[in-house]
Structures are given as structure tokens and as C-alpha cells.
Image (spheres, coloured by chain):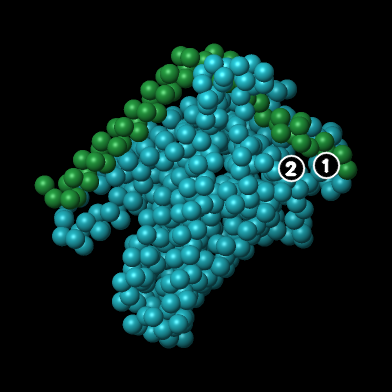
Chain colours: A green, B cyan
Amino acid sequence: MDFWNFLEYAAWALSVGFGAYLLIDLARIDSTYDNDLLTSSREGEIELTQERHQI
Amino acid sequence: MTTASVAASTQQDQRLQLLRVLGPGHVWALGVGIVLVGEYMGWNFSVGKGGMIAGLVACWLAGLLYTCVAMIDSEVTSTVAAAGGQYAQAKHIVGPLMAFNVGLFLVMAYTMLEAANAITVGFLLDAVAGMQGHSGLDQQPFIILTVMFLAWLNYRGVLATLTFNFVITAIAFVAIIVLFLSVQLGASAVQLDFSAITSEPLPYGWLGIIAALHFGLWYYLGIEGTCQAAEEVRSPARSLPYGTMAGIITLLMAATMTWYVCSGLIPWEYLGQAGTPLFDAARVTGNSGLMVLLFIGTIFSTLASANGCINDASRAWFSMGRDRYLPTWFGAVHPHHRTPYRSIVFLVPIALIFALGAPLDQVITFSILSGLLGYTFMTFNMIMFRRKWPLGSIKRGYVHPFHPLPAILLLVLCSATYFAVFLGYGTQLIAMMCFYIIASLWFHFWRYRFVRRGDQFTMPWPRPQAY
């Protein structure tokens, strides 16, 4: 097994690690917080706080 | 931040919003980061289609097209400062069906481009392994790792993501400047040779220039992605125009230097088929330092592009979910990292399916076509924006000059590029149009019933003229 074979295995392992992190954290957040809170973002609140559109 | 403190702070705020932490430099890194890979590969097929002059004409015509895009986008986005960029613009200015289509254009263009970049990383590593005597490298783990790592980075926060993009994009851009200056100062073993300009000015005639336009887009494709950061910049009205215009200036310089160095060092017949033209130009110089630098630049530009694409595609998807154009599940914000985490995770397998299961040229063509549809939208979006809300009626962070000339010019150049794409990829063009027509029918007859019509128009603007 040469250096590149080792890199292939390392890439597989890291990919699984990152993928597992994403899925586990998503499941943890979804089960910890209320969905209404997680989806409470609203467009345009920057406008309401920063821009008054008064010329 | 602990779960308890997050819950306490969010109870006070009542709402989770994306974090406003970005500055003009991050906007520049997002726009240029997505695009700069086009200087490192792809643009050179325009030389293959029509020769050296056609390649240069395509470079500058596409530059003109994208300067119009940058100016138009800067004006509208500095006013419609919302995640989703052109999607939010279409929603406010044209209407829901257009907005749904523009959202899809964005997600398809960026996800396909992300897949193409991941394929390219695998290809580059295979090439390096081959140079070191290792044949038959399995590219799949590297393709998957590219997508997974960048998705993880995006998941963890926008500031780290775009700071990372800023660093690697700046290195990739400096690499082009260093190559240009080194060749000018005589560091190359081979002298610049532009004799083909006079000996074979247009080997395929004027039609070659039209055909070259398709690949000329590669120099700049994606600069409009800066708009997606609108909800996460500290000062949208200032940062977005500044970052976008600085981005297009950077790309115009990079594109011209790239054409000059590559066309001077590599015979056009070879350049028109090269996989990595800037890296190949560095190899022609015989300077090992330049070779290493341009290889790093190639890898970094590819990663920066994929990284920016994940950022942009997820924001567009998130915005559509938030407005109920898609299931609201996608409109969630991570309570710690303040990122659209469900959209980021959802788009990972889609990118992987294209990266692992589709040929590179098809993936790139679908990305270009979706982008082109988006640019066509921008033309009449700009005209409608100025008609409905003339100058002086609402506050604009930037007002682009010579209206409506840039919009008309953009439409003319888009039409020419459609023709160019049709010449080479007519089947894909028709297939793509059919896909968007079917998606539009689904939205119109089924999905729109779930949209809360009054909630989707969020800008506190006066009633448009003539309404």
C-alpha cells in the first residue's frame, strides 16, 4: 500500500466523519429545539431595523 | 454558547436570524471565489472553438455582459437586501412564478457548479498521482470529501466559511499575477508568441466568435452570487455594491492576464483542448516554483468555487423554504451557528449524485444554462424595477449609470450566447427548458396554494407606480 492508497482511505474516513457530524448535529438540534423557533426567521427584518426608505 | 443560553437569548429575540457578520471583503471572496476557477480551466475551450482572437473577443464580450450583470445586481440588491438574492428580487419586482423559477435557476446553477468542482478536484489529484507513478487513483473518496468538508464548513458558520474563501481566493488570484509578471520579466524558458493572431486570425470564421461565447462565460460565471450574502452583511447598501464591483474588476484583470499568458505560451490548437491551461502555461515556462504555485492556485480556486456554491445554493433553497415555495422545513436556522443548516445538508446528496453520476461537460453545461436563464431574467427585472420604483421613490445603495443600456446590452449578449449554446448543446438546452416548464406547472397548480401571499413581500416600499 503506497501513499496514495493511504490517502484514499483517509479521504473515505474523513468523509464519513464529516457526514456523520452533519447528520448527528441536525438530529440533535431538531430534537432539542422547537420547530417553530428554528423556522422563525423572517425576511426583511434588516430593512425594518436599518432602512427607512425616506428620501 | 450553551443550549440554555441560546434558548434564553432566542426567547428574548423571539426569532432566529442569519448572522450579520460579513463585510465587503467577504462579498468579494464569495463572488470572485465562485468564479476564479473559470480562469484556471474551462475558458480555453473558447480558443478551441474559434482561435486566439475569438478567445479574446469572447473574453471581453463576456466581460461586458458580466459588467452589466454586476451593475444591475448592485443596484437591485442594495435595495432588496435579503437572502436568496435574485430570487428575492424576482419575488418583489416580477411575481411569485418568476421568483420560483429564479430560485431554481440559482440552486441548479450552483449545485451543478459545486459538483463540477468536486469532479475537478478528483481529476487534479489523479493527475498528480499519475505524475508520481501511481496509476488508477480512486477519485470517488476525494470527490466526496470535497463536498462533505465544505458542507461541514458552511454548516459551522458563514464568517469562517467566507474568511476561508477570502484567503484561498486571494492566493489563487495572486498566483495569476505572479505568473503574468514572471513571464513579462523573462522567467519563462519559452518566449511569448502571438504569431497565430496574424497567421490564423479566425480559423473557423466569424461563426467561431459566436461559438466561443459559450465558454467565454467561464471567466465570470457566478459573480452574481454576491447577492446571496445580502442578509448576512453588516451593511448591505454599502458592502454589496462595493464587493460586487470590486469583484468584477478583479475578474476582468484576471481574465485578460490569463488569456495573454496562456495564448502567448501555448499553441492555440493545444490550448483549446487543455484541461488546466494556467497550470500548463506554468509547466511550459520550465520554472518549478511557478508550477507549484499555479497547481496550488488551481486547487484553491476549485475549492473556493465549490465553497461559495454551497453557500449560495443553500441560501436560495432556504429562502424558498422560508416563503413556503418549498416545504417550510428548509427555512430553519441553526440556533448556534445561525446557518440554514437543513438546506445545506439536504443539498449534499444532490451535489454528490451529480458529481459521482454525471459527466463533467454535461454538469457544466446545465450549470451555464441555468445561469444564463438567470441573466435573462435580470434584464426585464431591471426595467420593471426602474418603472415601478423610479429613482427618488425608494432609497438605493447604488444607482447604475446609462439605464436602460446595460439591460438591453445584457439581453443582446444573452441572446447571442443562447445561440452559441444551441450550436453545441441544443439537446441539453431543450431538456433544461422542459424541466423548468414542468417545475413551473407544479408550482402554479399545486405548491402556490401553501404560500402565505401577504407574508412574502417584506420590503417596506411605497406602492409601485401605476398600481
The residue lying furthest to the left in this view is A1
Please state if B400 lies on the left or on the right of A26 as rendered. Answer: right
Q: Residue at x 38, y 65 (%)?
A: B294
SS at mark 1 in the image? loop
| Quadrant, the C terminus of chain A | top right
A19, above or below B112, in the image: above
Q: Which comes sooner in the sequence, label 2 or label 1? A: 2
**Disc ID at residue B180:** none
Q: Which residue is mark 2?
A: B79
Give residue B390's position: percent from left, percent from top: 83, 46
Per the model, the C-alpha gap separating discs 2 and 1 is: 8 Å
Give residue B194's position: percent from left, percent from top: 44, 83
Residue B269 picture quarter:
bottom left
Label 1 sits on what residue type?
Answer: Ile
Q: Which residue is mark 1?
A: B394
Q: Residue at x 62, y 28 (%)?
A: B17
